[in-house]
Image (tube, rainbow, N blue to C red):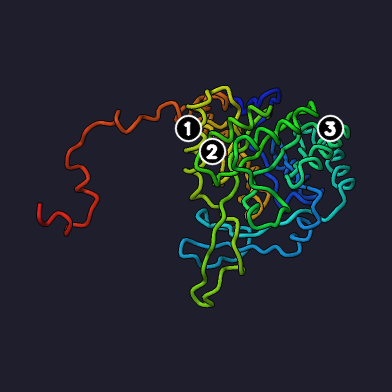
């Protein structure tokens, strides 16, 4: 018998843990419908805020896939698993009313497929964000993701925000959650020395769930031109970041307890990766880059692969949450193995032993 894919995030029951994370591929109604049809439990529509600078940035965007040698790959929607996305992003140019009307319409459609289409507000001005959050709820949208963890905050001139101070995180989350009753998912940055403290701060502000964590900022020098790839600093994400996300999921679970709902993002490329995130403590996972670069079939394949994994393990999705995180040993608990290191160094290192 097939095992259950259902998972619970606060007051929400999701049909499966595979969420389509916000990106340019979810900027249009057709893109959102494609994600719904592919089987995602939640589709987070492309972010919106009031900043004209954020919309202007859409016309300055650029994207590159690079391999492990930092060479550009073709954008052919069949990237190798180890491809890294380097990009700068921007927000949709439509009006707020048009953006919201699209989400309302699509969320009603998605409900027939046991799916939620969520609004995503990205922070610039807090008063404007609160006002938009109220209008999102009043329009009938069932879920809001509040993103203040974009990687671009330090470079975007106030168009978006990367919040790292815990008191500020609590303040801005509380400003939104105190005004609306629909669930609020807080999306935080990974560019912090203590991601767990940001999760705690978001919870203290009333977030129903925390999404961790946003892409990192990077610079890729091109050896031929001796200039930066795409001419500037870039948001960087790839499969290599999965262990980093899993580390913070595990540390957060250990510090805050197993009942704090967490959503993983950054590094997931498949259903097996969704399982890895859940074993590390996530209740669900957002796939973004993998879908943008690989097409909407990535969602369908991830749901199928996760289902097969659960059947093989004879466990429901909810039963694997945190299993690996709860088995992490401290360095002091690991067995002593004198001389074991000698098998992992070049022979010359040992010549005088």
32 to the left or right of 289: right
Label 2 to label 3: alpha-carbon separation: 29 Å
Count neighbours of disc 1 (C-alpha within 10 A) and say few if under 14, some if 14 to 19, many if 20 or more. many
Label 2 element class? helix
Residue 137: numbered disc: 3
Residue 86: numbered disc: none
Q: What x and y, as percent, mark residue 4?
A: 61, 25
Count neighbours of disc 2 (C-alpha within 10 A) and say few if under 14, some if 14 to 19, many if 20 or more. many
Residue denoted by label 1:
251
Residue denoted by label 2:
195
Q: Nearer the viewer, residue 351 or 126?
A: 126
Label 1 element class? helix
Which numbered disc, 2 or 3, marks the residue that appears first in the sequence?
Answer: 3
The residue that appears at 51% across and 28% down in the rendered structure is 253
Q: Nearer the viewer, residue 100 or 14?
A: 100
Q: What x and y, as percent, mark residue 61?
A: 70, 62
């Amino acid at each position: 018998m097939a095992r259950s894919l259902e998972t619970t995030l606060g007051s929400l029951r999701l049909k499966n843990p595979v969420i389509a994370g916000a990106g340019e591929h979810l900027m249009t109604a057709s893109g959102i419908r494609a994600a719904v049809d592919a089987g995602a439990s939640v589709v987070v529509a492309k972010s919106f805020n009031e900043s004209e600078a954020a919309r202007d940035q859409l016309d300055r965007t650029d994207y590159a896939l690079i391999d492990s040698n930092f060479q550009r790959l073709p954008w052919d929607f069949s990237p190798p698993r180890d491809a890294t996305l380097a990009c700068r992003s921007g927000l949709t140019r439509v009006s707020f009313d048009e953006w919201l009307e699209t989400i309302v319409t699509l969320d009603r459609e998605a409900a027939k497929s046991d799916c939620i289409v969520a609004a995503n507000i990205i922070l610039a001005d807090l008063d404007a964000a609160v006002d938009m959050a109220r209008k999102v709820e009043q329009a009938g949208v069932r879920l809001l993701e509040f993103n203040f963890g974009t990687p671009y905050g330090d470079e975007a001139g106030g168009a978006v925000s990367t919040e790292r101070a815990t008191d500020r995180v609590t303040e801005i989350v509380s400003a939104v959650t105190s005004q609306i009753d629909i669930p609020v998912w807080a999306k935080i940055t990974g560019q912090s020395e203590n991601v767990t403290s940001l999760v705690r701060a978001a919870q203290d502000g009333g977030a129903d769930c925390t999404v961790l964590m946003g892409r990192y900022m990077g610079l890729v020098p091109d050896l031929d031109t001796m200039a930066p790839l795409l001419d500037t600093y870039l948001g960087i994400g790839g499969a290599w970041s999965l262990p980093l996300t899993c580390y913070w999921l595990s540390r957060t679970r250990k510090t805050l307890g197993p009942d704090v709902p967490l959503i993983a993002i950054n590094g997931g490329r498949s259903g097996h990766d969704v399982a890895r995130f859940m074993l590390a403590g996530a209740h669900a996972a957002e796939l973004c880059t993998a879908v943008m670069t690989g097409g909407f079939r990535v969602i369908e394949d991830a749901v199928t692969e996760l289902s097969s994994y659960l059947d093989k393990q004879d466990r429901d999705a909810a039963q694997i949450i945190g299993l690996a995180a709860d088995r992490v040993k401290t360095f002091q608990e690991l067995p002593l193995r004198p001389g074991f290191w000698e098998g992992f160094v070049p022979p010359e290192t040992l010549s005088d032993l």
